[in-house]
Image (cartoon, helix red, strand yellow):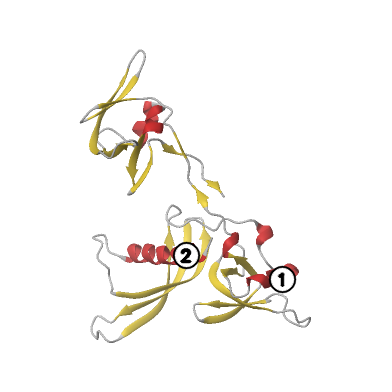
């Protein structure tokens, strides 16, 4: 994970917190000036984010209010860090962490609660508290901690896709009546249409759309793309996430 990806993680995290703090209508309950996440905690219900929040005073526009809060983000919104435990630096291998002084990463006191930081210093004094051998910078605050994980050791999930195995699998993801936007790879035209039905034939199956029929073969995956979550993906379904 490079610095841009690291910074984007915090931007995305703030956006998700702000969205979850909104009312059902999408209108913020308060005017949010800034959100600073300072601790991530893995729970059974998802990622629990502890954060500082600065808001505008509803009466005095020049007054800013500050408080601490926490919120549960759903697993599909915020995935926990993926890494090899051998890449975590502790008192036992702190010498190897010297090349990361001044670099960004994550620190923790318990393995399932990782927080973004910058590594400032490593302590080698024999009489120093071996439980906290790293000095880090966490949002302008210097802290000491026992574990440091470099940002470039965090693995990036890679999403892959495969063709739909059956019409039933297609309908599970795009049920009758749903609107889809798709295009052919070799032309610029884009179609937005409605799934109206499926037909099982003796030799071929078809997906019926409001503007045409598509033969249900693996060539759909090779020749077409479909728009999902504002992103063009192969005409297929997501498979197990791999880590690179």
Q: Residue at x 43, y 52 (%)?
A: 76
Picture coordinates of residue 115 (x, y %)? 54, 68
Left or right: residue 7 versus residue 215 is right
Q: Residue at x 33, y 35 (%)?
A: 186
The residue identified by callout 2 is 4
Picture coordinates of residue 124 (x, y %)? 74, 79
Q: Residue at x 37, y 32 (%)?
A: 223
- The quadrant in which residue 217 appears is top left
Q: Is residue 195 above or below residue 99?
A: above
Q: State the residue in front, 180 or 53.
A: 180
The residue identified by callout 1 is 94
Q: State the residue in front, 239 or 177.
A: 239
Q: Which mark is residue 17?
A: none
Picture coordinates of residue 150 (x, y %)? 60, 65
Left or right: residue 229 versus residue 151 is left
Circles 1 and 2 in contact, beta carbons < 8 Å:
no
Q: Residues within 10 Å of mark 1 (few under 14, many from 20)?
A: some
């Amino acid at each position: 994970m490079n610095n841009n990806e690291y910074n984007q993680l915090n931007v995305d995290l703030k956006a998700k917190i702000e969205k979850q703090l909104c009312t059902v209508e999408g209108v913020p309950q308060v005017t949010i000036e800034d959100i600073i996440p300072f601790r991530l905690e893995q729970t059974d219900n998802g990622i629990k984010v502890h954060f500082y929040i600065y808001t505008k005073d509803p009466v005095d526009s020049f007054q800013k209010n500050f408080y601490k809060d926490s919120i549960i983000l759903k697993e599909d919104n915020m995935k926990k860090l993926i890494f090899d435990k051998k890449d975590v630096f502790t008192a036992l291998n702190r010498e190897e962490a010297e090349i990361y002084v001044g670099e960004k990463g994550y620190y923790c006191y318990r393995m399932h609660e990782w927080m973004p930081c910058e590594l400032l210093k490593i302590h080698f004094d024999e009489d120093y508290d071996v439980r906290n051998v790293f000095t880090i910078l966490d949002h302008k605050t210097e802290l000491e901690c026992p574990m440091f994980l470099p940002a470039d050791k965090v693995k990036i999930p890679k999403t892959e896709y495969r063709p739909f195995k059956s019409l039933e699998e297609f309908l599970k993801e795009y049920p009758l009546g749903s609107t889809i936007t798709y295009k052919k790879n070799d032309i610029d035209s884009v179609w937005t249409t409605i799934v109206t039905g499926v037909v099982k034939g003796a030799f071929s199956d078809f997906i019926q759309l409001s503007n045409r029929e598509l033969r249900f073969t693996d060539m759909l995956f090779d020749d077409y793309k479909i728009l999902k979550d504002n992103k063009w993906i192969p005409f297929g379904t997501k498979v197990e996430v791999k880590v690179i």
